[in-house]
Image (cartoon, rainbow, N blue to C red):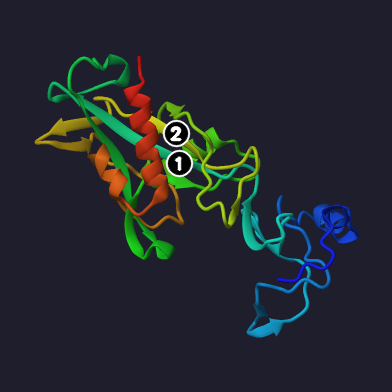
């Protein structure tokens, strides 16, 4: 790639950058490609190749897509979500002495089991029907905890006291996703006690059939699995949720 006159200061302070920022069309790390630099990405619109471009953007209420150059001289396609990046929720139950117990009643000196709730959901870009933890985008102006509560209700019909699982916000793919310093996906948990769930014949069942409220969701079921099962799923948010919850429980005092 030829970089004849790559001057970061000139790019950052350029007129096009100011225009893109005014229009809300620039992701944090992406700038217009300077003249003389070979374009790495071939761009087609309605099947027609676009030979000359400096910066490309596509925008929805949820995220902004850019093609351009970063200050490391690499050319990238990036996605940056609006506001916060969303939330993941892991519902779980604790079984000790063959009965469900609340988290605050757990005796860590004795053995216990943890089961996590997954939803059976149609996700086209994961190949079809998959098991994964509830999760979703943030609506505009919504903080991550409100997102978590709303998504949990929409996808499972469950409601209750959510708590944060400590750790850095998640970036699902740092090559293509921009989360910056304050963005990223936050993971929450909700402990279901014996008022909401039963433990019989080595199986967790909910006392009341959940009624998801999301009209656009394609969800078949909500079922509980041993926590370790989540580490084998193809969904990285479910894998991360399993790890965060396990760490939280292991360090609980």
- Residue 192 falls in image quadrant: top left
Return the x and y of residue 237 as percentages of the image width and height: 42, 46
Instruction: Say left or right for 204 vs 27.
Output: left
The image position of residue 214, as x and y in percent, is 45, 50
Q: Residue furthest right?
A: 15
Front-most of residues 197 and 63: 63
| Residue 204 x, y percent position in the rendering | 20, 36
Residue at 57% across, 56% down: 175
Label 2 SS: strand
Question: Quick one: 61 or 31, which is closer to the camera?
Answer: 31
Separation (CA) of disc 1 from disc 2: 6 Å
> In this orientation, which residue lies closer to the viewer: 246 or 148?
246
Q: Is the C-beta separation of discs 1 and 2 under 8 Å?
A: yes
Q: Residue furthest bottom?
A: 48
Position of 129 with respect to 81 (left or right) is left
Residue at (16% x, 24% y) in the render: 99
Q: Name the residue carrying label 2.
A: 188
Q: Quadrant of residue 57?
A: bottom right
Residue drawn at x 64%, y 45% as measured from the top left? 140
Earlier sequence position, callout 1 versus callout 2: 1
Indicate left or right for 240 with 112 as reference: right
Query: What element does badge 1 sit on?
Result: strand
Q: Is residue 2 above or below residue 119?
A: below
With 241 as the anchor, is 231 left or right in this view? left
């Amino acid at each position: 790639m030829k970089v004849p006159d790559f001057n970061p200061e000139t790019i950052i302070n350029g007129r096009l950058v100011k225009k893109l920022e005014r229009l809300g069309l620039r992701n944090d790390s992406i700038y217009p490609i300077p003249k003389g630099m070979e374009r790495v990405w071939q761009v087609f619109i309605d099947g027609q190749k676009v030979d000359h471009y400096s910066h490309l953007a596509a925008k929805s209420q949820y995220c902004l897509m850019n093609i351009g150059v970063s200050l490391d001289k690499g050319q990238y396609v990036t996605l940056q979500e609006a506001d916060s990046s969303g939330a993941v929720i892991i519902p779980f139950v604790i079984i000790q002495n063959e009965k469900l117990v609340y988290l605050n009643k757990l005796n860590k000196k004795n053995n216990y089991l943890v089961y996590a709730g997954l939803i059976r959901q149609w996700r086209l870009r994961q190949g079809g029907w998959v098991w994964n933890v509830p999760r979703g985008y943030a609506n505009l102006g919504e903080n991550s905890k409100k997102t978590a509560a709303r998504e949990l209700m929409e996808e499972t019909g469950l409601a209750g006291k959510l708590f944060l699982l400590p750790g850095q916000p998640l970036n699902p793919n740092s090559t293509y996703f921009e989360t910056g310093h304050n963005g990223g996906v936050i993971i929450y948990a909700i402990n279901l006690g014996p008022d909401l769930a039963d433990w019989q014949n080595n199986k967790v069942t909910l006392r009341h059939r959940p009624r998801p409220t999301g009209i656009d969701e394609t969800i078949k079921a909500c079922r509980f699995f041993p926590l370790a099962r989540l580490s084998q799923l193809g969904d990285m948010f479910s894998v991360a949720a399993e790890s965060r919850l396990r760490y939280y429980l292991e360090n609980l005092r």
